[in-house]
Amino acid sequence: MKKFFLIIGAMAVTFSVTAQNHRLQRFHHGNSEPTVYIISVSETDTISCTPQGCNMQDLAMKNASVKAAIKDHKNATRDGFQQASTPSAIFADKRNTFSFAIGGDVALRAAYSFDRTVNNIDMVPYNVPMTLTPADKQEIRMDATTSRLFLRGIANTTKLGQVHVFMDFDFRGGAAGSYTPRIRSGYVQMLGLTVGRDVTTFCDLTAAPTTIDFQGPNAYNFRFATMIRYEHSFLDNHLLAGVAAEMPSVSGTYGETLSAIPQRVPDFPIYLQYAWGENRDSHIRASAVFRDIYLYNKAQNGEDDLFGWGVQLSGNIHITKYLELFMNGIYGEGITRYINDLMGSGLDFTPRPDDHSRVQVTPMFGWQIAAQINILPNLFVSGGYSAVTVRKKNGIYSEDMYKQGQYIFGNVFYNLTPRFALAAEYLYAHRKNMDGLKAHSNRINILAKYSF
C-alpha cells in the first residue's frame, strides 16, 4: 500500500513540475526509503529529486540519469500510423537502471457524412450501403473513443540489455459509442524479441499517411495480434529483418456445407527492410505472410486445410524536408485479416461457386499511395488514393459480393503547440459489387487532440 501511495504522489508532483515551468517540488511519504526520482522531459531544464527532496551533492549524477532516461524513452517512441506520442512525464531511479513513463492523448473527432452514410465509425468502403434509404442520407458523429493512455517501462540490465515493457489503452472495446476500455497493445521487448500483443509484423507502420480517419486507407493493414516476434538489424541499421508467429483469426463464408473449427497453426509473417538517409528515415520493405486455415466440410464429412498467403511491397520516402511519400501494394489469397477494408468480411474463403461441396480461398489485392507536404514545421497537408479488389475464382459466389472499394482523402494538420493538434479532412468512399452495382459516400472530419 505504501508503494501505491508513493507512485500516486510521484505522478502528482511530476505533473505539477511540468505545469509550473519546472520549479523544484518536494513531497514526503513517512519514513520510506527514496525509490522514485521525478524528472521532466525538458532537455534544457532537467531536474530530479527524491521523495525527501533534492541532494545537491549528487545533482550532477541525477541530471545524467535524467538525460539518459529521456534519451531511452525518445528512442523507444515509434514513428508511424496511430503511434503513441512522446511522454511528458518520466520517472527514473538514481542511476537510470529503471525508468517509467506515462502519456497519452485526449482526442475528439467530429464527422459529417453526406450523399450516403457509412455504417461505421470510420470511413470503410466495404460498409457503404448499396441501397439508399432516408436514414442513410446524412449523419453527424462525435467520437472520443480514440483517446489513449500508455505506460512504458525501460530497464537497463547487465544480462538482458535494455528491456522494454509497453501497454496502451483506448476506448474502442465495445459497440460504437459504448466507450469500453480496450488494450491495444501490451508487450515485452528484449534481445530482439517481442512477446505479447502488438501491431502485426505484416504492417509497415510508416508506410501510411496521417489521417483523422482512425482506420486509414482501405488497402493498408493496421491491426493488432498476439505474437512472438524476432527482429534483427544489419549493416549499421540499414537492413532490418523480422519473423513472427501470430495468433490467427479467420473470417470465411461457410454457407450450408462448411462450419468453423478452432485454428491450429499460427500465421507466419516475415519482412526484410532497407533504409537509407541521414537518420534512416526512408525505406522500402518486402513482406510476406503464410496462413494455414482449418474448417469442417459437412458435405465431405471431413476437415479442409486451406493455404492462405500474401506478399506486400511498402515504403516511406522522404524526397525533401518538404515532401514525403507513402505507399504499399498487397496481393494474396485468404488474407482479409491483413487488408483494412476486408477485415471481418467473410472473404478468406467461400464454397466454390461451381460446387458448393468444395471450398476455395479468395484472391484479393490492394494498393495505396499518398503524399505529405510540410508547409511549415507545424503545418502540413496530405492526400492520397487507395483501392482494394476481390477477384473472381471459378465464377461468382454471389452477385452482391464485394468486388472493389476505393478510398480518397485530403487533409490539413496544424500543431497550435507541440502537444495540441487541430486538423480537418475530406474523405470519399466507393464500393462496387460483383454484379456492377455501385455506391459512394462523402465525409468531412475535424479533429482536436491534446497529447500529454
Image: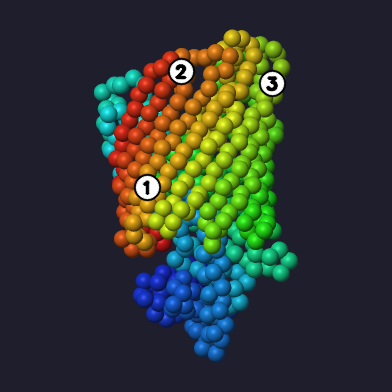
Q: Is the image coloured rainbow, by chain, by secondary structure, or in one colour?
A: rainbow
| Discs 1, 3 touching: Cβ within 8 Å | no
Q: Which comes before the other along the chain, label 1 or label 2? A: 1
CA gap, disc 1 and disc 2 = 32 Å
Q: Amino acid at mark 1?
A: Ser
**Nearest-to-viewer mark from 3 and 2:** 2
Residue 439's spot in the image, x, y percent?
35, 24
- Assess disc 2: are there few (<14), some (14-19) or many (≥20) residues with their C-alpha within 10 Å of its C-alpha: some
CA gap, disc 3 and disc 2 = 26 Å
Q: Amino acid at mark 3?
A: Asp
Q: What residue sits 58% from the left and 14% below the top?
A: 394
Q: Which comes before the other along the chain, label 1 or label 3? A: 3
**Nearest-to-viewer mark from 1 and 2:** 1
Direction bottom: furthest residue: 57
Direction front: furthest residue: 319
Residue 145 visible in the snapshot: no
Q: Which residue is mark 3?
A: 304
Viewer-nearest residue: 377 or 153 = 377
Residue 316's spot in the image, x, y percent?
50, 49
Q: Is residue 84 above or below residue 8?
A: above
Q: Which residue is mark 2?
A: 434
Q: Secondary structure at mark 1?
A: strand
Q: Secondary structure at mark 2?
A: loop
Viewer-nearest residue: 331 or 77 = 331
Q: Secondary structure at mark 3?
A: strand
Q: Which residue is mark 1?
A: 382
Residue 51's spot in the image, x, y percent?
51, 78
Image quarter in which the N terminus is found: bottom right
Q: Which of the labelled discs sits on residue 294, or is there none?
A: none
